[in-house]
Image (cartoon, rainbow, N blue to C red):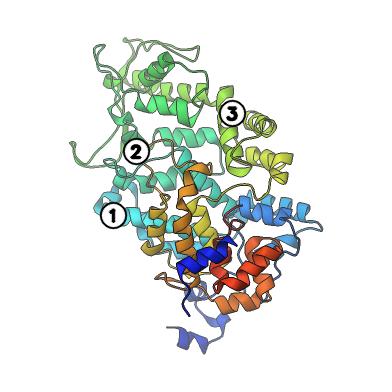
């Protein structure tokens, strides 16, 4: 008898044949990656404790959830769950040492991701956008470098760009590659500079039209305001409107070649034009930026004009408000929506002492008592929910538009947020997505999503039966009420994915 949504919600409230003839070790590398599971299949050990332990906690919080076998693999790294979790985090902080063959091959089919900046304009913008979204989901689901992908998502929100604006339709692909992914676990000052000179960011926040060829021309302050308010000091970081205007003056003259401007070649190239730069003296957050003398030769004036960008970035990155702002956002992402002051202070201090080293900052965060103790308290955003569901069920998926459509309906498709502040982290804005989460869980459990398939019988068998499957998906042993609901539902897998416990991390 088919399971109706009403019944489900009510209960919830309470080439292959040929390859098979050849040994796996004889397959070509490309086919081996495409047709084999990410890890050897077979029985795996789910969590055995009644509460979320340290291993489950880090797999939920510093990754997009556990796949079959992940818990057991991490648990074997050390004698205790706490030490094993710490060892896993240390591994994840060094993604360059983690082999990621399967994810790399899965993403390789999205050819536009590796296209040089200037050639991106030869592609239809819809294709670029779709491949960028699909690749983002594929990496979240398949990558072994889970913390890296989590931080890519974090920085994509922090330096949000809406690809629907102007040339951003083409340039965001390069921004994702050269700004976000290149620096996600690197140094914040390097990422900030890359973002400031990103052709996509220059388009999105109007830096390309920030000019002052004469004293009557008013600089465009859009990027300067977001640089201070969102990217560095924060809303209450201690800057004034005068600081915004002074920063805007320092950044005049930068532009990017566009599709609708002569000379119609080297589209997307960033340039600095000294005749459009304000060469007068400025004062940013109490620090003087000296005037550029008019009697210097053009090359020296250009050098000094360009250097004002680096001077501004130096001032804002070492400002104490920047450390606090970044620390607060990281604690909100990894610890709790209501950020604990003690943890923020520790993380901000690590950020400042390391001069914005992201790994050192995260290492300090993961060592805080607040991170280690606050478990299962965060509500998964829609992207995290869907990625974790695909991982937990070991789904074979093409990360197709059908799944992206679920994310669109939930308001969390990658690279679709219209304003510079990026997708919100706290739970409140996402509570209205519950119905679509239930719809997705049902569709996934019943294999009704084109391009995505779950082997429920294999998952059930390898997890050790119903009890093991519940423990695997919940990250702990189920309660009596959860067990009863699972058996009564007629669709236990979907019920678990839609349960409050799975939707939290």
Specify few, some or many for label 2: CA neighbours under 10 Å numbering under 14, 14-19, or 20 or more: many
Task: Calculate the distance from the C-alpha at mark 2 to the C-alpha at mark 3.
Answer: 26 Å
Q: Secondary structure at mark 1?
A: helix
Residue 157 location in percent, x, y? 46, 41
Residue 214 location in percent, x, y? 24, 14
Q: Earlier in the sequence, mark 1 or mark 2?
A: 1
Q: Earlier in the sequence, mark 1 or mark 3?
A: 1
Q: Nearer the viewer, residue 236 or 76?
A: 236
Q: Which is more foreground, mark 2 or mark 3?
A: 3
In the picture of the structure, the residue carrying the numbered disc 3 is 323
Task: Calculate the distance from the C-alpha at mark 1 to the C-alpha at mark 3.
Answer: 37 Å
In the picture of the structure, the residue carrying the numbered disc 2 is 199
Residue 190 location in percent, x, y? 50, 35
Circles 1 and 2 in contact, beta carbons < 8 Å: no
Q: Secondary structure at mark 2?
A: helix
User: In the rendered image of this protein, does residue 34 appear above or below residue 258?
Assistant: below
Q: Nearer the viewer, residue 352 or 495?
A: 495
In the picture of the structure, the residue carrying the numbered disc 1 is 126
């Amino acid at each position: 008898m088919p399971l109706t949504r009403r019944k489900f919600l009510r209960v919830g409230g309470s080439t292959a044949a040929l390859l098979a003839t050849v040994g796996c070790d004889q397959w070509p590398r490309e086919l081996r990656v495409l047709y084999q599971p990410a890890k050897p299949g077979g029985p795996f050990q789910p969590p055995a404790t009644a509460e979320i332990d340290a291993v489950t906690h880090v797999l939920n919080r510093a990754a997009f959830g556990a796949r079959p076998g992940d818990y057991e693999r991490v648990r074997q790294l050390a004698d205790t769950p706490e030490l094993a979790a710490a060892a896993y985090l240390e591994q994840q902080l060094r993604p360059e040492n983690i082999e990621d063959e399967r994810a790399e091959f899965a993403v390789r089919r999205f050819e536009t991701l590796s296209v040089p900046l200037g050639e991106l304009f030869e592609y239809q913008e819809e294709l670029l956008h779709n491949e960028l979204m699909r690749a983002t989901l594929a990496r979240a689901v398949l990558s072994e470098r889970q913390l890296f992908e989590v931080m890519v998502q974090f920085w994509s929100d922090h330096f949000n760009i809406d690809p629907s604006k102007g040339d951003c339709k083409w340039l965001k692909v390069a921004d994702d590659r050269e700004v976000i992914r290149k620096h996600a676990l690197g140094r914040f000052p390097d990422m900030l500079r890359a973002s400031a000179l990103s052709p996509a960011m220059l388009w999105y926040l109007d830096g390309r039209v920030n000019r002052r060829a004469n004293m009557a021309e008013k600089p465009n302050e859009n990027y300067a305001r977001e640089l201070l308010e969102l990217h560095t000091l924060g809303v209450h970081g201690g800057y004034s409107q005068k600081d915004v205007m002074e920063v805007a003056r320092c950044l005049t003259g930068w532009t990017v070649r566009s599709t609708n401007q002569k000379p119609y070649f080297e589209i997307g190239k960033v340039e600095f034009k000294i005749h459009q730069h304000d060469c007068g003296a400025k004062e940013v957050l109490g620090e003087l930026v000296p005037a550029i003398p008019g009697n210097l030769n053009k090359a020296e004036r250009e050098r000094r004009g360009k250097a004002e960008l680096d001077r501004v970035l130096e001032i804002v990155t070492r400002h104490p408000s920047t450390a606090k702002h970044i620390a607060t956002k990281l604690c909100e992402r990894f610890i709790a929506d209501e950020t604990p002051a003690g943890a923020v202070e520790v993380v901000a201090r690590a950020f400042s002492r390391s001069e914005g080293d992201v790994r050192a900052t995260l290492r300090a965060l993961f060592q805080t008592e607040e991170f280690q103790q606050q478990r299962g308290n965060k509500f998964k955003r829609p992207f995290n929910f869907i990625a974790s569901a695909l991982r937990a069920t070991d789904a074979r998926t093409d990360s197709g538009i059908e799944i992206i459509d679920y994310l669109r309906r939930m308001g969390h498709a990658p690279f679709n947020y219209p304003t510079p502040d990026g997708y919100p982290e706290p739970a409140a804005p996402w509570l209205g997505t519950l119905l679509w989460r239930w719809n997705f869980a049902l569709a996934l459990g019943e294999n009704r999503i084109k391009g995505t398939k779950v082997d429920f019988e294999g998952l059930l068998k390898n997890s050790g039966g119903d009890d093991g499957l519940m423990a695997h998906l919940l990250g702990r042993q189920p309660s009596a009420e959860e067990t009863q609901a699972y058996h009564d539902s007629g669709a236990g897998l979907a019920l678990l994915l839609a349960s409050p416990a799975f939707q939290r991390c």
